[in-house]
Amino acid sequence: MKDDKSSKGNPDRRKFMKLGLMTGITGLSGATLLSNLASQEELQASGNKIKLLTPDGKVVEVDAENINKYPEAHITPAESREGIPNRKFVMVIDLAKCNNARKCVEGCQRGHQLDPHEEFMKVQLIRDNEEGAPYWFPKPCFHCDEPPCVTVCPTGATFKRDDGIVLVDNDRCIGCKFCMTSCPYSARSFNWGHKDKFENTDQPYSPETSVPASEGTVMKCDFCPDLLRQGELPYCAKECPMGVIYFGDKNEDLVTNGVETLRFSQLIKDRGGYRYMEHLGTKPNVYYLPPVNRQFPLERGFDIDEEILDRYKDVPEVKEYKAKAKK
Amino acid sequence: MDIAKRKKELVKEFAPNIIHFGALSKFWIGLLLALILTGIAAFIIQVVKGHEVTGMRDNVVWGIYIINFIFFVCLSYSGAFISGILHFLKTPLKNSVMRIVEIITVLSLIIGPIFILLCIGRLDRLHYLFIYPRIQSPITWDIIAILTDLVGCFIYLYMTFIPDFAILRDNGQDQPIWRQKLYRFLAMNYQDTPEQRQRLNKLIRTMSVMIIVLAIVAYSVLAWIFSLTLQPGWNSTIFAPYFIVAGLYSGVGVIIIAMFLVRKYRKLDHYIRKIHFNVAGLVLLIISLLYGYFTFSEYFSRWFSHKVHDINLLNTLFSRYFWEFIFANYIGVLVPFFIIFFKRFRTIKLITFSSVVAILGLWMNRYLIVVPTLETPYIPIQDTRAEFINYSATWIEWALSLGGIATFVLFFMLIVKLVPVVPMSGIIDNERENNNHKSANKIR
């Protein structure tokens, strides 16, 4: 993390940020480098050996010649099935702080080269019952531990990794859309038509970046494993100005929103954290903190594009607001 | 009884049906070809422009393609089921409808899976299903079940054709050379010796049992594609038996319509008689009761226990889809029931009419199972794009659907041009049996 906040960071946070930490001149992901080396049969040794530290803490020595060939860490579809060792990623979303700033959505769209209507992270306006007040509900993919989408995939194009992340390999996807019908959270979207950005070959495709997308295949929120490998937070958590989205590692029992780092288990206990629609048995890895003692009135979230506000036009509060605005 | 002579007579009797293409059938073939070509054009557009040209979007990801898929495949399973059961009935009546049922079975099993292919975003990667198969996926089960069923039905259909191919081979001297050659090849040196006949009958009987089992397995798996998901309208324990009953309902309906058309245009009043319609009508009556019962149980328990998401679905069904719901689940069940229930309505035309109503109702019932469920997911759809909120099929989808139906009808017409629609061998078998009875009585 290069932002100012992190330099102040406490020891816990630094410990967390060790995730994917890289030393060495290039700052490459060592794991990738290693596997790239393994696949590279014709090594032209320069004689110059350089010591690198891999994310799982091993010191390795590689030939200097090989390093400059891979200016960016690229995780191939096969490698992306492995997962980052010893991690169990988890997200906590604090509903009390969300005011629909939509920075998470925009950051995610920028990071994944998505068009305006393509959203991996959606912000819904949810009202649990007639008495309850509506609240803003950011909804990524829940990366379930019992993912119905993975079970039904006929080709293994979508898979669950050891680190808890559910990814889609759009090189493997045949576009049957069975995963979309079996996801109870509508987390997935489909590339219905052709777009020029699919042909962008600036960077090779990796399920970890979900870029470039491909026509006739499924895509969804990926928890940004490419950023995690570099020790950064996912785009949504990074961009949120309110610190709504905490992200971290269940094994280390730590989550951070970039400002504060908290014990995951304590946070869930103290704040009554819950998982959405627990009764479905999908065991999500995204937890919510209930919208109590809210920091912003709901209306703060109405200051958005007319077109986006229209999405929520069935919610009474939005109806009232729109009626007032007309006068 | 001189069997060889009788065979010759039968070939002569059926010859006009087989060989000549009248003006009417030429017109129909032209029309069907036009429909099929439109379908092919639509398919090309869909391949070139992508699935954007369909009405399917992120929420309703499956549209009328999958409905047609279920519809045709269920037609096939019920055909297999019915013909398997018919083989065990010792009645001379069955002979006249046997072949119609078998042809419907195989044809719909070929056309059904084509519709599921239209749903697939990346047809160029279809082989991945075999390169990277995952046995956990119900789709893989479905592929295995359908392929097995297809092979089984095909073998079965072919075996029932062999005796007739042999008859046509032996009595077709005045036919074109290519036909003679074709029949000789297809008859597989079947000489109708008692030994051969016995062996073939035994095989057909074994196959007919296997086909019933295959039909039940394959159709259950198809139902599971829906009921194994968590979606409110789909996650139901009775879906597999419900689909099987629904399949039989449409299957009997299509068989009745086929009987009606064959009888009318092939002038086979002598073979397909009123009693066939009566019996088939009664079967339709019984299945309509079963089907109505399953439909009622399904919706009643959802309504009574009123879980939020079930109620959302029912609200959609009773508002946006009100008339469709009434048509599918009231008219589609009750009209056929009442027509056939009263004896004086049981005429050939009315029974056929009630079959048409049953089939249309059933198709709509499938539509109401697939589309409204996808339009009411657990997390409410909050979108401003109309096409993402509600599904409506585009002309591409309709053109391909009609193309599929046209292919079905066209192939049916062509197959009954190749072999008589009423098995000649069956007629002879029946007569032979009658003779045996008579002579046995005489000896006594």
Image: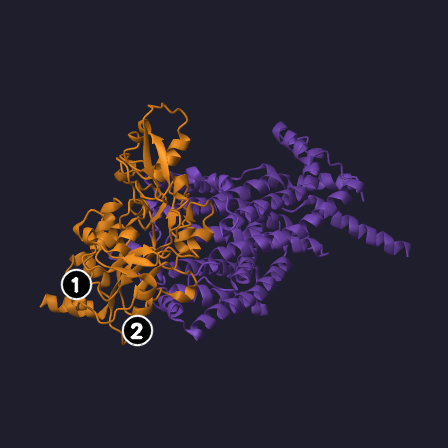
Q: CA distance from mark 1 to mark 2?
A: 21 Å
Residue A302 is marked as 1
Where is B299 relative to A169, above or below?
below
Residue A148 on image: x %, y %: 44, 56
> What shade has chain B been given?
purple
- Considering depth in this image, is A225 or B149 the residue closer to the camera? A225
Residue B146 on image: x %, y %: 55, 47
Is residue B272 in view?
Answer: no
Give the chain ID for the orange colour: A
Is residue B76 in view?
Answer: yes
Badge 2 marks a residue whose secondary structure is loop
Whether residue B130 sits left or right of residue A36 in the image: it is: right
Residue A129 is marked as 2
Residue A180 on image: x %, y %: 39, 53
> Which residue is most to the right?
B444
Question: Disc 1 sits on a residue from what chain?
Answer: A
Residue A11 on image: x %, y %: 26, 55
> Which residue is most to the bottom?
A131
Badge 1 marks a residue whose secondary structure is helix
